[in-house]
Image (cartoon, coloured by chain):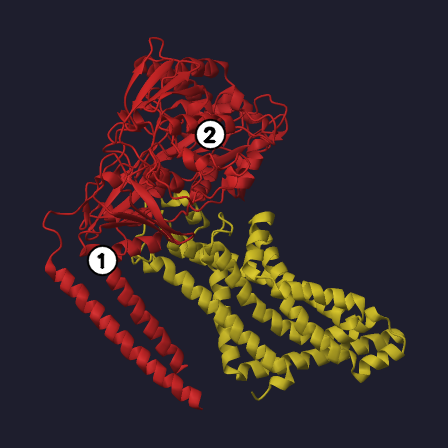
Amino acid sequence: MGKRTLRVLATGALGFGLLAAGLSSNVSAKDNLVFSVGVTQDIDSLNVSVGYLVMDFEIWNLTLPSLTDMAAEDFSILPSMAESWTGSEDGLTWTYKLRSDMKWSDGEPMTADDVVYTITRAVEEGWVNHTATLANITATVIDARTVEVVSAVPDPKLPGLGVYILPKHIYEKISTEDLPNYPADDNVSGGSFQIVERKEGEFIRLARNPNWWGKEPKIDEVIFRLYETAEAQFNALKAGDLDAIDDVPVKIFTSVAAGEVENLIGVAGNQGSFSNIAINTSCATGIGNGHVALKDPKVRQAINWAIDRQLLVDKLLNGFGAPAMSIVPSANPAFDIKIDAAEAYSYDPAKANALLDEAGWKDSNSDGVRDKDGTELKLRYFDRSTSGAGDTTPFITGWLKDVGIATDVKTLDEDSLIAEQSKSDFDLYTWGWTPYVDPDNMLSYFTTSQVPTDPEVGGYNDGNWCNEEYDALYVKQNAELDPVKRAELIQQMHRVFYDEAPYAALYKYDNLQAFRSDRWQNFTRQPSNVGPVLFTNTSPVYRDLEPAGSGGISGGTNTMVIVIVALAVAGGIVVAFASRRKKSADDRQ
Amino acid sequence: MSESTGTTFRAMTWARRRTALSRVWRELRHDRPGFIGLLLLSGFGLFALSAPLIADRSSLLVASGRNNPDLAAPSIKFLLGTDEIGRDVLAQLVWGSRVSLFIGLFATVVAVVIGSVVGLAAGYTKGKVSAVLLAIDDFFLVVPFLPLAIVLAVVLGRSPVTLSIVIGVTSWAGSARLIRAQVLTLSERAYVERARALGASSWHVIVRHVLPGVAPLIIANATLIVPSAILTESTLSFLGFGDRLSPSWGKLLEGAQSSGSITLNAWWYYLPPGLCIIGIVLAFTLLGRSLERIFDPRLRGR
């Protein structure tokens, strides 16, 4: 017993020593600046053709180049691999001129070949992260420094072309069959950083890429450390083991944002993430069994009026978010729905009741649930088991009950939920989206062609909603090259979506992030003022970060750290020695 | 004639049971840990029963915190403060005790019924049937319990009843083993052999002679399953696999943990449910151990 206690002490002291040593290298060695980020989500896959988590994108943003970049302020198109470009009259053909000084981290030249190879292969093989952007695009090599891109239809996204470009000399050795299982462990980088070490489930370490040709970062290394819980991660940040974290628990974030926690600053950034309830409108598809009441837009509007969005924002988000009236199609708030406050959905149970009465759903048998022609207004409500995702459920089921709509709640994991959605086998279900920068993708999900008709294939249109007006507007905006006119068309689409209500959009929520302001400065947000710092669309922060203050770190801290290390090591030695003596005494017995 | 003998027999049986019961009560009263356990348990029972007197059910509704401060410290209005959405913690604690107790007891019934049936059958039968039952029992003994419970909870759904069944189904294996061992020793006893020699059917022997013999053991064992069932429910709720719509102590802890109340020093949120879980587990364990001592003469004097 005694022996075990001693051992624990010894390892404890040793661990403390290591920790202190890590800290000292963090602050004292000016020639090796390490930026440690805490995350609660592990990498899914580093392989661009299959990965899909935000963590994967963050690594790709650091290690893979793209033809064009996006400005941190407003997502406007910036040169990257391409230093200039020219477009044809009809806007269908774009010619990109590449920089001449580009190399991959292994020294191989980076040329037009890499660009065209990646685009062509991504289109042929249908890579998940490339197809949306490249659907109508073909690329050809003009010379080593010139790429010609042709779009089959007018494309308002061009000349912006931000897809990740891969090193041809690595990927041409990997066949189509092998690619989905390729772990992407070649570590050849064309971005500002390159992967140097990875332990799955623990951390991934990246160092500055010496061959990077863009803006040189001031930090030398970035480490992403995985934590089990958001709270543990926050405490690591507070203790100084980390420099930045994503996913701060909202109540804790409130105290950080109020400046109550020394040396920390909080950033509540939004890039369009929103939560919603999909309402199965049962558009005729041959599959599915949504409740008959939900085919009536009045009933769907009633559901929208029954929900107190502001209370959800106040209580669940502590104010770090905003009520949502329609889908949020873009990370850029310029594309949000514009609607008068007087008209917008607010908490109005009386109005919800009136609409339901109008639609003919009345409580004829006085059981507290509305009915019509012998059918009760009882809806299957599927909620997502992801932590936090179901917090809205008890609120919303309560409000629906108040207006005479009964619910039968079932909690499912995301895969099962998608399966039910693909079969259209639900009435209501909770979900959420984080849109791209260009609104096209998000808008396309609600066109009739995206309604699932085969459970094996599924479809994005999870309201099973068909609307000819919306479809026509979608096609129009997709080919409208004038940004002002396109924005108008998108507002019209919002209006149709709002009136038809295939969704009860709930709220936009912020990403809550916290940083060590005593160590770092220049926390670039994307987009400026409203966006987050970590996990943004193009991750500019890692190139902009600087150590805090020009004076550097005072000698006092260093001495303190050295003293702590010395004490810990001495303690460790003494304890280890005591433990060994005890051990030999045991052995002798 | 035969009828009158029947009633006499019945009266005798009842008299015997009464004396046995009063003996148990007497011994329990003098067994200090067991008596403390019983007192604690009665306290929790009263607490659960008095829920409607302490807090209105409507204060469990999520929207009930609309005008209350979030994570407010205990005050006259909220004796145990409020949670992260402004709800009264005391209301959730007292109503949650019902859910926790219900799941604990119902899960135990499920586990004991399965465990007794399998234990009796495996102990009384010989050959293949027994071997197969034992193999199933072994499987449930060695299979990692929590992952199995989580998988079942996900598949079967999350109402208190299904959760009880999930917990019961995953925690009967130990008692089946225990009961089988007791059945094996009982079946070799002279009175069982005599009954068999007189032509009693297996059913008669099991129900009339073996079952009464193992009943005390089953009761003592059940008392020890309750706390583990309550703990399992709390664990499942804490991990987010519980019933989201009914309050339980585990769910309170989960809420406290995910809202960061430990970092924020909101002790009124996580301490009471934690202490309640410890208290009720302690109560059942003390009582169960003491019943075991009373029913099993071999454990006496230890």
Residue designated by label 2:
A303
If you read the primary sequence from the N terminus, does the residue marked by circle 2 or circle 1 appear first?
A: 1
Q: Is residue A300 left or right of residue B87?
A: right
Of residues B297 and A55, the one nearer the viewer is A55
Mark 2 or 1, closer to the camera? 1
Q: Which chain is red?
A: A
Q: Is residue A408 left or right of residue A198?
A: right
| Place of residue A261 in the rendered image (x, y in percent of width and height, measured from the top left) | 21, 52
Q: Residue at x 41, y 18 (%)?
A: A493
- Viewport quadrant of the N terminus of chain A: bottom left
Residue designated by label 1:
A25
> Is residue A256 among the parts visible in the rendering?
yes
Vertical comparison of B69 with A168: above or below: below
SS for callout 1? helix
Q: Residue at x 51, y 38 (%)?
A: A180
Q: Residue at x 89, y 78 (%)?
A: B198
- Kind of residue sitting beneath label 1: Ser
> Is residue B66 among the parts visible in the rendering?
no
